[in-house]
Amino acid sequence: MPTKPVFLTQFLIEEMREHGEQMPDLRLLIEVVTRACKRISIAIGKGALGGVLGEAGTGNIQGEAQKKLDVLSNDILMEANEWGGHLAALASEEMDEAVMIPEQFPKGGYLLLFDPLDGSSNIDVNISVGTIFSVLRAPRRPTGPLEESFLQAGTQQVCAGYALYGPSTQLVLTIGTGVHVFTLDRELGSFVLTQRDLRIPADTQEFSINASNARHWEAPVKRYIDECLAGKDGPRGKDFNMRWVASMVSDVHRILTRGGVFMYPLDAKTKAQGGKLRLMYEANPMSMLIEQAGGAASTGRERILAIKPGKLHQRVPVIMGSKNEVERVASYHAGG
Ligand code: AHG
Ligand code: MN
Ligand code: MN
Ligand code: MN
């Protein structure tokens, strides 16, 4: 960690200056989003004392029962962002449709998408959860329904990031110039730069998958995992370790930190809906971070960031992490 703390604002100004383009609106938007993440972090930190645990008693468009914190986190992000003047519209995992910035507030040139609380099944057992977000440019002359403005490939993202609410709260961010990690100084209420230019090792000995779905997997994924499980005596010639937190944010954070491959592949259970994870709130922002850190992200059949979305809540199979491992899984899908 640098001796003189670098706060998020200073980092963004200097990073943008170094890369030749000041984008004050994007910087202010990131600051608004991360301020909301601080509020979510505080609410989560209160746990049972804050009365925020348990079910909300409602459902979302994903067919999931909402936790109180799913709804609260969504409300915090909505409330923080609608008046800022940097956004044209927002979309969330927890809302049926995209929302235009209300008439009484000024509009800006960006679109914000978020998974307000990722891993919410872990909330009641006090295991790490997070918030994932993605920023796109709003089309200059939007045509058709609002949803269409959002249907841009992940390569068009101008910023992606997540907040991880773990033993410490961290912010992991990219504006297309590498991946940078900030840690929340709880006394100051500020995110401080703690790691610049995170890189994922190309090879790994660790994988992350919900193995209870093994009987539903397709043959290429089964082959890859079987080879990992065979260890030193198998075709890989080394032992593999396995980890599954069941919060994508935590699982991907571990992979960004020490390498590995994270998978929620297509399986017989999720095939009808195209996969389990959401393309625009989960897969795209995480894929941008992974690629910016030198890793790869694929459905097994194509690069996730190249997908042209057909609908806002589209789902997608996800295989991401250390480059050589992701390419190996993709080659098995291609019949290699
Ligand atoms: P969310 O809590 O936003 O709905 O996302 C949950 C996702 C993801 O975080 C995680 O990787 C996966 O669901 C866990 O799935 P399993 O319950 O099958 O382990
Ligand atoms: Mn959910
Ligand atoms: Mn999620
Ligand atoms: Mn969620």
Image (cartoon, helix red, strand yellow):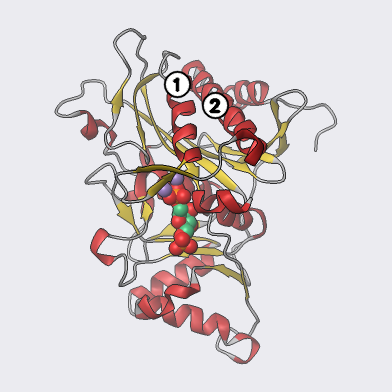
Query: Can residue 242 be seen here?
Result: yes
Dot 2 amino acid type: Ala
Residue depicted at 46% across the width and 67% down the height: 327
Image quarter of residue 31: top right
| Residue corresponding to mark 2 | 36
Residue depicted at 62% across the width and 49% down the height: 128
SS for tag 2? helix
Query: Can residue 287 be seen here?
Result: no
- Quadrant in which the N terminus is drawn: top right
Q: Nearer the viewer, residue 281 or 284?
A: 281
Image quarter of residue 99: top left
| Residue corresponding to mark 1 | 79
Q: Is residue 8 above or below residue 336?
A: above
Q: Do tag 1 and tag 2 residues touch (Cβ < 8 Å)?
A: yes
- Residue 275 position, x and y percent, is 33, 60
- Residue 61 position, x and y percent, is 29, 44
Residue depicted at 29% across the width and 31% down the height: 98
Q: Is residue 35 above or below residue 296?
A: above
Q: Is residue 5 left or right of residue 55?
A: right
Dot 1 amino acid type: Glu
- Residue 251 position, x and y percent, is 57, 57
Q: Disc 1 and disc 2: Cα gap in Å?
A: 9 Å
Residue depicted at 57% across the width and 87% down the height: 230
Q: Nearer the viewer, residue 165 or 49?
A: 49
SS for tag 1? helix
Q: Nearer the viewer, residue 2 or 30?
A: 30
